[in-house]
Image (cartoon, helix red, strand yellow):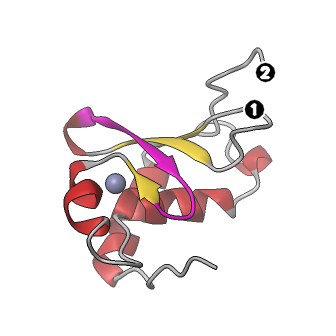
């Protein structure tokens, strides 16, 4: 069982902004249930694999050294996962429509 620390309030605020600004996209496909692309600051795309992987520098430098620590991209993707896709067709983008 992988434990993930509770996000701090600042992370939650930034994660909500990601959702509101449609910065989180779900990767479609049977084998990609937990895969997301999150566009962070400076418009850089990061790969997020829930529950606890992100390709961003912050997570690679700090997250991997601290068990349970996640970045706000991961927080955003986990929040997005709980929302039914039908409610937000704008940001639930089909990145791999052929699958
Ligand atoms: Zn990240």
* Position of 41 relative to 68 (above/below): above
Q: Residue at x 63, y 35 (%)?
A: 27
Is the C terminus in the top left, top right, bottom left or bottom right quadrant? top right
Q: Residues within 10 Å of mark 2 (few under 14, many from 20)?
A: few
Residue 29: numbered disc = 1
Q: CA distance from mark 1 to mark 2?
A: 5 Å
| Towards the viewer: 82 or 88 | 82
Residue 1 image point, x, y percent: 64, 79
Residue 3 image point, x, y percent: 54, 81
* Position of 58 relative to 93 (above/below): below
Residue 51 image point, x, y percent: 56, 64
Relative side of 57 to 52, left or right: left
Residue 59: numbered disc = none
Residue identifier under label 2: 99
Task: Check residue 66 for magenta coloring.
Answer: no
Q: Could you say whether the residue bearing mark 2 is in a helix, strand or loop?
A: loop
Q: Where is residue 65, by image quadrant?
A: bottom left
The quadrant of the picture showing ligand 1 is bottom left
* Label 2 CB-ligand 1 distance < 8 A: no
User: Residues in magenta?
Assistant: 43-52
Task: Check residue 47 for magenta coloring.
Answer: yes
Asked if the residue under mark 2 is in contact with the one under mark 1, i.e. CB atoms within 8 Å, the reply is yes
Q: Where is residue 25, by image quadrant?
A: top right
Q: Could you say whether the residue bearing mark 1 is in a helix, strand or loop?
A: loop
Residue 12 image point, x, y percent: 40, 73
Q: Residue at x 67, y 27 (%)?
A: 94
Relative side of 61 to 39, left or right: left
Q: Residue at x 70, y 59 (%)?
A: 83
Relative side of 4 to 60, left or right: right
| Towards the viewer: 85 or 96 | 96
List the single residue furthest toward the top: 98
Q: Earlier in the sequence, mark 1 or mark 2?
A: 1
């Amino acid at each position: 069982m992988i434990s993930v620390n509770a996000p701090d309030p600042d992370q939650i605020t930034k994660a909500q902004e990601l959702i509101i600004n449609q910065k989180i996209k779900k990767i479609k496909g049977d084998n990609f249930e937990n895969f997301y692309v999150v566009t962070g600051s400076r418009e850089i795309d990061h790969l997020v694999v829930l529950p606890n992987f992100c390709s961003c520098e912050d997570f690679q430098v700090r997250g991997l050294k601290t068990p349970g620590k996640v970045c706000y991209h991961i927080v955003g993707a986990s929040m997005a996962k709980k929302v039914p896709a039908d409610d937000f067709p704008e940001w639930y983008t089909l990145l791999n429509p052929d699958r």
